[in-house]
Image (cartoon, coloured by chain):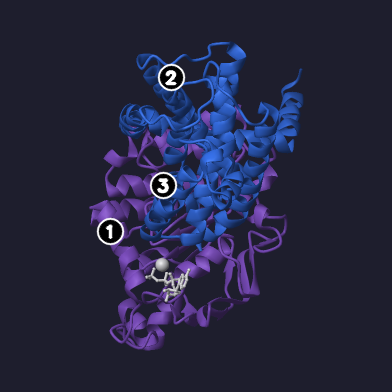
Amino acid sequence: MKTYTAGISNPDDTKMPAGYSSAIETHELTRKFGDFTAVDSINLHVPSGRIFGLIGPNGAGKTTTIKMLTTLLEPTSGTAKVAGFDVHSSSKEVRKRIGYVPQMLSADGGLTAYENLMLSAKLYGMKRSDRKARVEDALNFMNLSESSNKLVKAYSGGMIRRLELAQAMLHMPSVLFLDEPTIGLDPVARRVVWERLIALRKEYGMTILITTHDMEEADRLCDEIALMHRGKITISGSPADLKTSVGTDANLDDVFVHYSGGVIEEGGNYRDVRKTRRTANRLA
Amino acid sequence: MSEKHAERQTGWLSSFFLVEFFRESLAISEVEIKKLLRDPTELFTRAVQPVLWLVIFGQVFSRVRGIPTGRVTYLAFLTPGILAQSVLFSAIFYGIAVIWERDLGIIHKLMVSPAHRTSLVLGKAVSSGFRGLVQVVIIYVLALVMGISLRWEPWAIGGVLLSVVLGSAIFSTFSLVIACIVKTRERFMGIGQILTMPLFFASNAIYPLELMPPWLRWFARFNPLTYLVDALRSLMIQGGHSVHSFGFDLVVMVSVFIVFLLTARRLYPTLIQ
Ligand SMILES: Nc1ncnc2c1ncn2[C@@H]1O[C@H](COP(=O)(O)OP(=O)(O)OP(=O)(O)O)[C@@H](O)[C@H]1O
Ligand SMILES: [Mg+2]
């Protein structure tokens, strides 16, 4: 495993405290919107260095969970620690140590890839002398060096996703949060993203939490999966364990249907579908 | 100096709050300005409206003798008002741009960075100030063409630039606050109209406050646009008259900006919840 300094004034700033091995730990984490409970008392434990998958039907509460873990949304009750720090009381420490790719395509289309990354480098407080090298490393790692000076709006969906990963890993965070990282991508682009994620974990030991609706993706990538349904975690375990718990020849699709009680029954609302569609449209 | 030592120094410097804070704000405004220069059509389309106001409205109302404009012509009286108007109208679009960026997820990404939320807001205000400077150039050129006698003393021009940057910062941040409250583009469009028109008409931009009924004059006194126009009136125009001293107008504008900045900083995170 490579050692890394992210060019931050103090390299320890992006690492977890010494001797701490839980990348994510939540205790009865809950979020309500009015009377509606979007995330209901969940307890997660993700050891560092894992790829952890959060799956579940539209509206299950996956994005809401990620927003709480990335300090964007205050929990209504319960606690969460990310990279060793409490999301509520030490949010700034958490932010230094995480990377996040939102469900939407969030790279700025009016800027080049290089400019997008340079902005992040500055916001993450990297030293001037290190910025350029870090940005180029990240572009290289995501195979984007060739087109780094093209405006992002001319990028393909797969390239945008890789740029976003480059942006999320730029400061060498301990934990990465990826909300549906391959939605709307063609099979080839999707595989490239998988391969890069595996490389990120292997080379830098990053912990990765992803949400996905793609069971093949969950099966291929994740060491452990938790299935969310109506704000609760209904089951969690390794892909293999989950499959055997349903039946001998079961695949993850069967697991999904089994533990979320059939998807047709409700499956999110207009708002959720509109969001997903918008992401997919931008890729088209 | 050893490398180690140099490193510690930059470390010390960048942990100094203000340095960090301004670096972040500058990073934000720099990309905004870059995007603006890459596609400047918007800058020019925003110039159309003030041109129409000065050329059409100004010419027609010049014939009405009843508006007391002191020692200057009505057209000269109107020019600073129209500059302030174009500052207001272009800054007020910041809110909708931010809602758009929120829908794209750009704001989410800024918000998970360890950058101070205040500097994220300030960066937007600074780039709006830059837009304001472009408006100054447009209005000055137009005023020259129309034969209005402008003031060219460097300190007067400096005062105009400073006032316009502050005014743009005030209204773009105000717009951000509104965006954080209404949250959707559709609602913002409606509210934006409802807010900008009264701000414009209940100010001294196109007529002096004396003409207004007392209740409206009272409202105009709480309108930041009034202080921007007041400062501009003597700074831009030869023989122009300001009701307050420049110092007073500045203090009012800076205070209003600080209040909006702190409010926007509080509300900004709610935009993505
Ligand atoms: N700001 C909000 N105000 C009110 N309700 C919300 C808000 N954000 C999310 N919700 C609701 O909370 C529930 C969980 O939403 P969330 O986005 O976390 O689901 P998800 O599992 O990510 O779904 P998807 O797979 O469609 O992305 C949904 O019913 C959603 O409508
Ligand atoms: Mg989601």
Q: Are marks 1 and 3 in contact (CB under 8 Å)?
A: no
| Res B75 → quadrant | top left
Dot 3: element? helix
Q: Which chain is blue?
A: B
User: Which is nearer the eye, A88 or B243?
Assistant: B243
Residue B182: x %, y % from top left = 46, 61
Residue B30: x %, y % from top left = 50, 31
Which residue is depicted at the point 37% across and 47% down?
A162
| Res A12 → quadrant | top right
Query: Could you tell whether B205 is left or right of A41 in the image?
Result: left
Q: Which mark is residue B97?
A: 3
Identify the hue of chain A: purple
The amino acid type, in three-letter code, at marker 3 is: Ala
User: Which is nearer the eye, B244 or B138?
Assistant: B244
Dot 2: element? helix
User: Which is nearer the eye, A71 or B67?
Assistant: B67
Query: Could you tell whether B99 is left or right of B214 in the image?
Result: left
Tell which tag, 2 or 3, sits nearer the viewer: 2
Q: Chain of mark 1?
A: A
Q: Earlier in the sequence, mark 2 or mark 3?
A: 3
Which residue is depicted at the point 39% across and 60% down?
B187
Question: How far apart are the alpha carbons under marks 2 and 3?
Answer: 27 Å
Question: How far apart are the alpha carbons under marks 1 and 3?
Answer: 21 Å
Binning the other alpha carbons within 10 Å of mark 2 as few (below 14), some (14 to 19) or many (20 upward) gives some
The amino acid type, in three-letter code, at marker 1 is: Ala
Q: Are marks 1 and 2 in contact (CB under 8 Å)?
A: no
In this figure, which residue is indicated by the disc labeled 1? A280
Q: Quadrant of ligand 2?
A: bottom left
Q: Are marks 2 and 3 in contact (CB under 8 Å)?
A: no
Question: How far apart are the alpha carbons under marks 1 and 2?
Answer: 46 Å
